Amino acid sequence: MRVVVIGGGIMGCSVGWRLAQGGAEVTIVERAVPGAEASSAAAGMLAPQMEAERPGPFLELCLRSRGTYPAFAAELQELTGVDVQYVPSGILKLAFDEAGAQELSERVAWQQAVGLRAALLDGPGARALEPGVSDRVVCAAHFPDDHQVDNQLLMRALTMAAARAGATFRTGVVRGVLEEKGRAAGVDVEGERMEADAVVVAAGSWSGLVPGAGISPSTVKPARGQMVQFQLRLPPFRSMLSSPQGYLVPRRDGRVIAGSTLEFKGFDKAVTAEGLRRLLDMALTVFPALADAPVQAHWAGLRPWTEDHAPLLGEGSLPGLHLATGHFRNGILLAPITARLVADALLGRQVPAGLDLRPFHPARGTGARA
């Protein structure tokens, strides 16, 4: 089977790797450098519990993918020699007022009720776990099973793994999905016809711009997220820290990544004074000792937003056309499960038992989060 994957980010490379492992002849088409967009701009949080508002199919999908990450990271290291820095750090979600404390109390309660590990801490309890956390914190939810990975190392490992499995990388702009006899038959890459038995659209925020993909630009839109990176000699805290205004992710080498804004500015990746101010204010509010930390870098990435915040997974508007896009904040987290689902569908294998994929079908209407 010949498969063209449109998009060379973490999603496209994960899908291409698993398809090539399964015996498919895979070409990954990327308009620029693989992983240069949202894949490299993220913070690498694997935090479904921290973000979940309620139980349901979307949380189940995220938990399934999170559960595969230790083996996923180990397999990549064995194949490529790249340690993707999978760290079981846990996360503290912080509240600074009584309304926030009530929301965290309810979140911890329903998660405990469905069997997930979560604990509610008062302010002193939060500071006992992470001593530098602000004295203004009145309450925190601790999710010890929400972890992290270095997304840039992950991107490097995935490109290597895909190539070693036999996938070919092609640089170019896809001008359209080819159609023959009512099904997807390949892609047009800058005027060159590239025939295939199946096409996978994994182009992130650009997915709606691929002619013939059957995705409206209003269905998958770019959501700009600005980021700031501090550099210290040692990590100042162990847990990821989340607040209503943003989050802090500590790396093993002393870097701390602060993110992220949420802005709808089209495909503009500018870093703005207002964005930096908001991120720096958030960082110092959460962890005041960062006031003396050198700011090493800042950047912005475009995340593929959908109205219900859930991805588009499954067969598209044509037979042979499959979508793996719209993952918004959860692209890093959902890469392993998405790659398996796409590979299973195209290679005729059984879908993992117990997963309800109907809320993620590309043909679904907009509505409340699944």
Image (cartoon, rainbow, N blue to C red):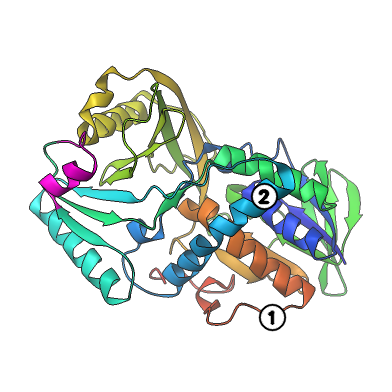
Regarding mark 2 in the picture, which secondary structure is present there? helix
Q: Nearer the viewer, residue 59 or 64?
A: 64
Tell me, for residue 350, which label it has, or none: 1
Q: Is residue 133 magenta?
A: yes
The percent position of residue 337, horizontal first and vertical second, equals 59, 64
Horizontal side, residue 370 vs residue 133: left or right: right
The percent position of residue 162, horizontal first and vertical second, equals 76, 50
The percent position of residue 304, horizontal first and vertical second, equals 53, 51
| Residue 318 makes an appearance in the image | no
How far apart are the alpha carbons under marks 2 and 1? 23 Å
Q: Residue at x 28, y 17 (%)?
A: 292
The percent position of residue 204, horizontal first and vertical second, equals 60, 50
Q: Is residue 298 magenta?
A: no
Horizontal side, residue 250 vs residue 197: left or right: left
Q: Residue at x 86, y 67 (%)?
A: 197
Count the marks: how many?
2
Depicted 188 relative to depicted 106: above or below: above
Tell me, for residue 76, which label it has, or none: 2
Name the amino acid type tagged 2: Leu
| Residue 26 makes an appearance in the image | yes
Name the amino acid type tagged 1: Gln
Horizontal side, residue 140 vs residue 38: left or right: left
Q: Which numbered disc, 2 or 1, marks the residue closer to the eye?
A: 2
Q: Locate residue 59: give its quadrant.
A: bottom left
Quarter of the image containing the N terminus?
bottom right
First in sequence, mark 2 or 1: give its number: 2
Quarter of the image containing the C terminus?
bottom left
Which region is colored magenta? 122-134
Q: Locate residue 104: give its quadrant.
A: bottom left
Q: Residues within 10 Å of mark 1 (few under 14, many from 20)?
A: few
Q: Residue at x 55, y 62 (%)?
A: 68
Q: Nearer the viewer, residue 216 or 96?
A: 96
